[in-house]
Image (cartoon, grey):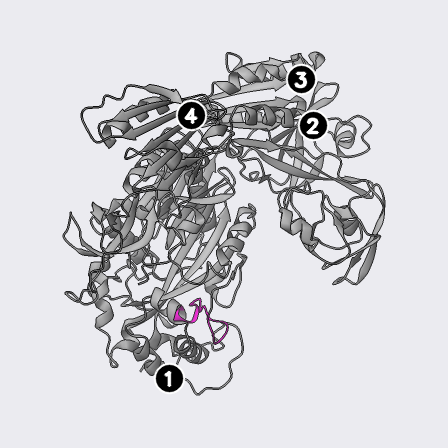
Amino acid sequence: MLISNIKSRPVYERLRLDGAGRRHLVVSDAPRDLPEVIDGVESAGGLLGYWMVASTATVDGQPQTASAGGNAGEVETRAFRAVSHLMDRLTHRLAQESVGFRLYAIGEEGFIWEIARLAREAGLESYECQTAHAGSMRRKVFCVHCKTITSGVTTSLVACDGCGAHLVVRDHFSRTHAAFMGVLADAEAPGDLPPVEELFP
Amino acid sequence: MMGQTLKLRVASAVTLAPTLKAFRFVPAEGGLVPASGPGAHLRLFLRDGDKVHRNAYSLIANPDDRSHLSIIVRRVAASKGGSAFLHEQVREGDVIEAGLPANLFPVIRTARRHFMVSGGIGLTPFLAYIAAFEAGGTPWELHHFCRPDERGVFEALLDPYAGTRVHIHSGGTLDVLDGPLSHQPLGTHVYTCGPDALMTGALERAAELGWPKARLHSESFGGAVAGGAPFIAVLRRSGIEVAVDAETGLLDAIEAAGVEAPCLCRGGACGQCLIEVADGVPEHRDHFLDHEERASNRFIMTCVSRSKTPRIVLDL
Amino acid sequence: MTIQFKPDETFREDFTYSNSDAAVLRFPFPFPEDVYMYSVNIEPHVPGGPTPAFDNPFDVDEHYVAECRERAKVLEQDPSRCKVLPHMMAAQWDTLELIMESFAASYPAHFTLTREGTNWTWENRPLGIRDSFVFGDASTLPLPPFEYITRQAQGDFTLQDQREDNLFVDGGMVTTQADWSMDFNVGMTFHQWHGPVPLAHEKGVFDRALKFLLRLQFGAPVRRLNWTMTVNPRLDTSPENYPQWGPDRTTLTADNIGAKLHLRVELQSLFRLPRSNAILFGIRCYLCSIEDLARVEVWGKRLHRVLRDLHPDIADYKGTTRYRDLAVAYLAAFDDGAALPSGTAPRQATLPPKG
């Protein structure tokens, strides 16, 4: 059973602002400087927002405005207490948006594909939501046997949070589940497990 | 390749306006017509003496019970072709031949809302669209552009849906689209059908307002595809040479010579008629080949394209 | 034509499934040449082919009733084997219409479709089903239309929605699969869905196949064959139940491999659906033990050569690594090395006795 070189594994590129959009929102799962995460901000023809997760209760999600430099107008920055806090606010924003909007997400895979799912559910096309990876490579793994998703997986082999099966992590990625496929490693010879490797630090 | 053909009887032919005639067809030999979906077209093979006109018309309905097929035909000014033939020669009770319905302008099933822009007879596919949206409960909005003198005809056609979703414009400007296009919820798709200038105009406005290509859909209607310098097509496998005159399309000339060639849309869109070029340089007029394929000059879409060289050798 | 069904066959536990001689001879053997490699092996799906398995749009054979029962068992345990995204309702009705019309036309002794406008009555005599419903009104059927009809057909089915110049697998009934999961794959693009297949991506197979399929026309379906191998006549070799069937692979011995190891062939068919513009992908699974296959002289020899010379990546992907040597050794006894004509027809009308 091959576990690598599978073409459904996402390939990430650096975020680049789509100048054709009229309103742009960048979301990040950690505080990062805007120019660090996205190119082309100076060509933003319209409104630009930058929302980040600060991971502290001391922030309140209030908008702050600052100049983005270049020809761009102002950037409206918001800091959120946690990923869930940001997602909740984003759901409201998406419900009010109209066509012409572009969304950009950067962070760990678990985060960016959750954002992509929210975007899809709100009616955004894949072209209107860019994703880029930053931070840990740890994965979410969908147990194909019991349907439980195990998060924070850094190794080639992991015990499923649901059924306890030793899962080998395939490179097969489902955008719907925002997770990689996990398949029982020792089905053919119970107890005969391959060595555990740290593959997704 | 004409593929499977249907024999249809003209159940009714109703003049809607001096230039517009509605036809309703039923199976000539009983049974049911083939199923079709919104955006599908029907190709008619009209035998006019020793000539065969091959014209494609959007189906204006896709009845669940498959009892009939309906089209509306605009008589093209100065036409010597299919539309004039349909208007003048085809009567109730006549039996005509047609291909199976095909769809090059399908509805985007994942769309949350549908925004349609039509011009003149380009309304026809949207009559089928609207029926499907109504049946499925999907929100929609239509902007129809027409000449002031035809307004009444289109109002009558759209009468069952009159209300806030139908907007008929006979003022000649597309400016009225800017407002609505700026305020469509995420998940809306735009479809346009009609004269080239209208479709291009509508798509350009949408693009300027931030609409990505994936949300924009258009159907181009036939247009003139023949016309150009005459040339000789050498059909290598058939072992014959075909003279293509200035007024005839390559595919038409090949068929007139009795050679079966693959084709479907006859409009350079579907890709079915792709033929390899062994020698000579094609004049590409299709929408199918990509930039690289065009530049290689190794392929030609016979339905619309011609030859830049006096001779072109085809693998046919 | 009346088919003699074998309703009590099983595809699990005691595995009483078997092929009659006629069923062996109609097997859609997949290897026209001695060497196997991926290709865009697509041809028009028109009646007729090397065996009667190709005679109808949807093949019904002696295993029909037993396979439908097996499907019902799988669905009872795991209803997510049938998943259809909400925007595929038109494609659901397309599928129902296509299968009912085809069955009624191909097998009038077993299936009857009566229509008056949109009032339809469907009779499936082998399964004892008779339902009247309104075409287009899902509330008049006991199950959603796609599930309703695919529970009454052999083989798996998926629905592909066409948009953005791509195909999305936005629905499916998948209970007899060769190790892929509908629940995991739902919503994937053509290339994502085929992600795990080795070598073929590099050869451009999927790029060309996709371009071809995007142009697939209503009324002009196509087909291709795919294959793998399965230990025991088990239809449900899903990744979901891999813990149950994975151990089978270690049970093979030189003595039992002929009866236990099955060549699994998928007769895949692709139909453009007229109302939805979606594509229906039929994956009709046939199982035949290598012992029975070797009773057809040209098939035994060819299978030996294909397995012996199989590219290691493909052998691994198809899960044969553990027992390939054993199978090759078993089949070698049937192969004198003589040159074989290309093609897949059995070239004999009867089978020698077993054993």
Tag 1 residue: C332
User: Looking at the image, which is closer to me, B240 or C134?
Assistant: B240
Q: Secondary structure at mark 3?
A: loop
Quarter of the figure with residue A24? top left
Cβ atoms under marks 1 and 4 closer than 8 Å: no
x, y percentage for residue C204? 51, 58
Relative depth, front residue between A124 and A83: A83
SS class, disc 1: helix
Camera-near label (3 vs 2) is 3
Residue C257 in sight:
yes
Range drawn in magenta: C23-36
User: Is C32 within the magenta?
Assistant: yes
Q: Chain of mark 1?
A: C
Q: Are marks 1 and 2 on the same chain?
A: no
Question: Dot 4 falls on which chain?
Answer: A
Q: Chain of mark 2?
A: B
Q: Amino acid at mark 3?
A: Cys
Dot 3 and dot 2 within a common chain: yes
Q: Nearer the viewer, mark 1 or mark 2?
A: 1
Marks 1/3: CA–CA distance: 76 Å
Q: Position of residue C292 (x, y in %)?
A: 35, 75
Same chain letter for marks 2 and 4: no
Any mark on residue B81, and which?
A: none
Q: Nearer the viewer, residue C97 or C269?
A: C269
Q: Secondary structure at mark 4?
A: loop
The quadrant the N terminus of chain C occupies is bottom left
Three-letter code for the amino acid on which mark 4 is drawn: Ala
Which dot, 4 or 3, sits closer to the camera?
Answer: 4
Q: Are marks 4 and 3 on the same chain?
A: no
